[in-house]
Image: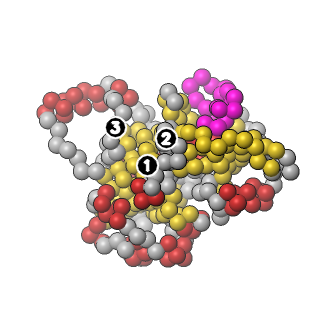
């Protein structure tokens, strides 16, 4: 064992202790899979990460991501939090415009937007869930069928059953049976859009003109347009405070199907006393970016 640089970073918040923490070991060299998993179980956070030298050309660093129950090929808030820790520790990207992270899903681009970081959502595979699975999950959530607007199986590394519900109030009132979700082996992400306020003709015209010049010319949304919750009992996390990979796949699905605008702000974590804010945007090339602020809450060393 040796002393290794360590940070605990709160992600998707600019205020400490209101987002989703990730434990980051800045030098995972020489650690076995078992040692990494053991430490992840000990931290008991939704994810613990280990930075390693890259093995692929163009990557700035390699990242391994562990939950208390196993390793993930990709996850969103660990990607942003680990990149933030790498930069804070003096990391310098090879490219001018992006940091490039290597993980099990391949190379993930991360861009800096002032103090905020955003990752390019990995390619999404999605399909319609079967009616039997939907019925079982709805029963485990205590969800009435008339509250369900749309559903998709979403896979961008982690896999989720995504459910679009009729209102944020429905999302926030859910009291899932986590043991049943664990038995089903199904992670579930639920979301609902905030009611749209009718726009005046002048505002509508301004929005059309802004879209004509690209989404990034618009001011970032200041109020959440989507309420999100993530239930992940099968990997040892009954409810995740703020979930980057889920918000990425929700964004890819909901924007593509016309349920959500090309740029919006998602809220997550309310039921856990958090105030996570996730910035989602689809650029002119069709790439969805998922961004959030990061705050270092603990910095020091860990014996591993």
- CA gap between label 2 and label 1 equals 9 Å
| Residue 189 figure quarter | bottom left
In the displayed image of the protein, which residue is found farthest to the right? 1
Q: Which residue is mark 1?
A: 275
Residue 25 belongs to the span the image colors magenta: no
Residue 173: x %, y % from top left? 34, 65
* Residue 15: assigned label: 2
Secondary structure at badge 3 equals loop
Q: Which residue is mark 3?
A: 222
Identify the residue at image location x=43%, y=52%.
268
- The residue segment tinted magenta is 83-105
Residue 128 vertical placement versus 205 (above, below): below
Q: Mark 1 or 3 closer to N-term?
A: 3
Under circle 2, the secondary element is loop
Distance between the Cα atoms at labels 2 and 3? 16 Å
Going from N to C along the chain, the mark reached first, 2 or 3, is 2
Position of residue 158 in the picture relative to residue 197 (left or right):
right
- Image position, residue 64 (x, y; %): 69, 49
């Amino acid at each position: 064992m040796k002393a290794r640089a360590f940070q605990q970073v709160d992600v998707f918040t600019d205020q400490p202790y209101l987002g989703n923490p990730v434990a980051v070991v800045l030098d995972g060299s020489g650690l076995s899979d078992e040692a990494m998993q053991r430490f992840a179980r000990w931290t008991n956070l939704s994810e613990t990460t280990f930075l390693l030298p890259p093995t692929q050309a163009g990557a700035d660093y390699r990242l391994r991501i562990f939950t208390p129950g196993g390793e993930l090929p990709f996850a969103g808030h660990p990607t942003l939090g680990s990149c933030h820790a790498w930069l804070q520790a003096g990391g310098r990207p090879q490219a001018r415009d992006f940091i490039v992270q290597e993980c099990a899903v391949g190379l993930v681009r991360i861009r800096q937007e002032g103090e905020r970081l955003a990752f390019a959502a990995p390619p999404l595979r999605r399909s319609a869930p079967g009616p039997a699975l939907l019925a079982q999950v709805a029963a485990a959530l205590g969800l009435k069928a008339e509250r369900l607007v749309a559903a998709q199986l979403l896979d961008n590394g982690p896999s989720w059953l995504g459910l679009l519900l009729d209102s944020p109030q429905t999302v926030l009132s859910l009291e899932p049976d986590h043991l049943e979700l664990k038995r089903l082996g199904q992670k579930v992400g639920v979301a609902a859009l905030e009611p749209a306020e009718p726009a005046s003709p002048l505002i509508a015209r301004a929005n059309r003109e802004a879209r004509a010049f690209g989404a990034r010319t618009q001011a970032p949304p200041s109020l959440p347009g989507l309420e999100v919750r993530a239930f992940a009992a099968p990997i040892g996390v009954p409810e995740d405070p703020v979930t980057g990979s889920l918000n990425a796949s929700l964004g890819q699905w909901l924007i593509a199907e016309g349920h959500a605008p090309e740029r919006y702000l998602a809220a997550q974590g309310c039921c856990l006393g958090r105030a996570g804010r996730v910035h989602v945007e689809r650029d002119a090339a069709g790439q969805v970016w998922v961004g959030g602020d990061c705050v270092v809450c603990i910095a020091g060393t860990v014996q591993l």
